[in-house]
């Protein structure tokens, strides 16, 4: 396909939220407090949280730090075959196409990780960057604990999200992608783990991108799913990552068909 340059899309500004962002500034808006040494201290949840908080940051003029973390799928290693992963598409859309060039997008996903892994390493992989938004995609590896691990996953996820909120950042939860079942032994309980993420987001008013539901609707037939799954098992390839990015853009309100990134081919 032919790539074309486009001017930054013009998005309507929500006057109230823009005034909040402009008047308070990003740090004050998020309720972040710093010690004299500059370290992050526990803070009240941001005045504008959830999806509306993310949209307010995008509507404002202050630069935003985005930390995107998860397991191998977010890591984007190996199975992208050199193509961009969804965090890279996100950076292109936000930092270039939306001309938010001072925004910072950091990917700290690690292959094989689970919620306890990121929790134990949260200071290094997330909080040291003093993020405004933290995107989390987990469950693909956690689900191998099966039904017996569901309650612990729910508890661990809740603790992680609350630590992120306490640091003054807005969490953005992502359900994992659907998988090619025939080659995904050990992950039979993945739908239940995706449901836990969905239920937690709804119960606690956390912004959610429901990739599982989107993929299930877009590719209900297992054979049709294969172009999105590079290893014919669980790992999305070039097209799966493009679809991840597009769904995130739709949910947070920055999808635009005139954008080269949003217009990337997906079969």
Image: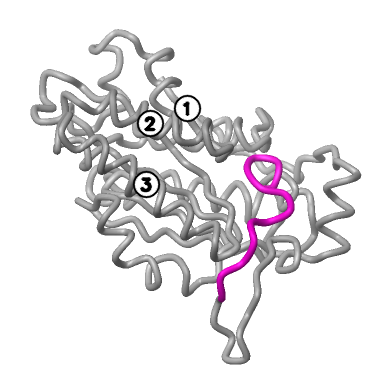
Q: Nearer the viewer, residue 160 or 225?
A: 160
Question: Which residue in the structure is indicated by mark 3?
Answer: 157
Question: Which residue in the structure is indicated by mark 2?
Answer: 239
The question of residue 101 being in magenta is answered with no
Who's the residue at 24% across and 53% down the image? 113
Q: Which residues are magenta?
A: 41-53
How packed mark 3 is, by other alpha carbons closer than 10 Å (few <14, some 14-19, many 20 or more), is many
Disc 2 to disc 3: CB gap under 8 Å = no
Specify which label sits upstream in the sequence, 1 or 3.
Answer: 3
Who's the residue at 81% across and 57% down the image? 21
Q: How is the image coloured?
A: one colour
Q: What secondary structure do most residues of the magenta stretch adopt?
A: loop
How packed mark 2 is, by other alpha carbons closer than 10 Å (few <14, some 14-19, many 20 or more), is many
- Whole-angstrom CA distance, mark 2 to mark 1, is 8 Å
Q: Quadrant of the C terminus?
A: top left
Q: Quadrant of residue 227?
A: top left
Question: Which residue in the structure is indicated by mark 1?
Answer: 265
Who's the residue at 44% across and 30% down the image? 198
Disc 2 to disc 1: CB gap under 8 Å = yes
Relative to 174, say whether 120 is above or below.
below
Q: Quadrant of residue 177?
A: top left
Helix, strand or loop for disc 3: helix
């Amino acid at each position: 396909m032919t790539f074309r340059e486009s001017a930054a899309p013009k998005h309507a500004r929500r006057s109230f939220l823009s005034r909040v962002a402009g008047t308070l500034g990003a740090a004050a808006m998020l309720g972040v407090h710093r010690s004299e040494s500059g370290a992050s201290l526990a803070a009240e949840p941001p005045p504008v949280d959830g999806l509306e908080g993310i949209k307010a940051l995008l509507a404002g003029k202050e630069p935003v730090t985005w930390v995107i973390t998860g397991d191998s799928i977010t890591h984007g290693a190996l199975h992208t075959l050199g193509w961009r992963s969804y965090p890279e598409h996100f950076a292109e859309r936000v930092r270039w196409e939306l001309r938010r060039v001072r925004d910072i997008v950091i990917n700290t996903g690690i292959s094989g990780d689970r919620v306890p892994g990121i929790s134990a390493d949260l200071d290094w992989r997330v909080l040291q960057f003093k993020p405004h938004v933290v995107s989390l995609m987990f469950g693909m590896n956690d689900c191998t604990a099966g039904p017996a691990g569901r309650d612990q996953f729910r508890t661990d996820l809740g603790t992680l999200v609350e630590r992120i909120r306490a640091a003054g950042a807005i969490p953005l939860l992502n359900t994992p992608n659907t998988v090619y079942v025939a080659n995904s032994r050990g992950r039979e309980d993945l739908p239940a783990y995706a449901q836990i993420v969905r239920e937690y987001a709804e119960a606690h008013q956390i912004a959610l991108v429901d990739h599982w539901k989107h993929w299930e609707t877009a590719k209900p037939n297992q054979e049709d799913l294969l172009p999105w799954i590079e290893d014919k098992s669980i790992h999305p390839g070039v097209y799966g990552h493009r679809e991840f990015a597009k769904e995130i853009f739709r949910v947070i309100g920055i999808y635009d068909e005139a954008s080269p990134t949003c217009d990337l081919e997906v079969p």
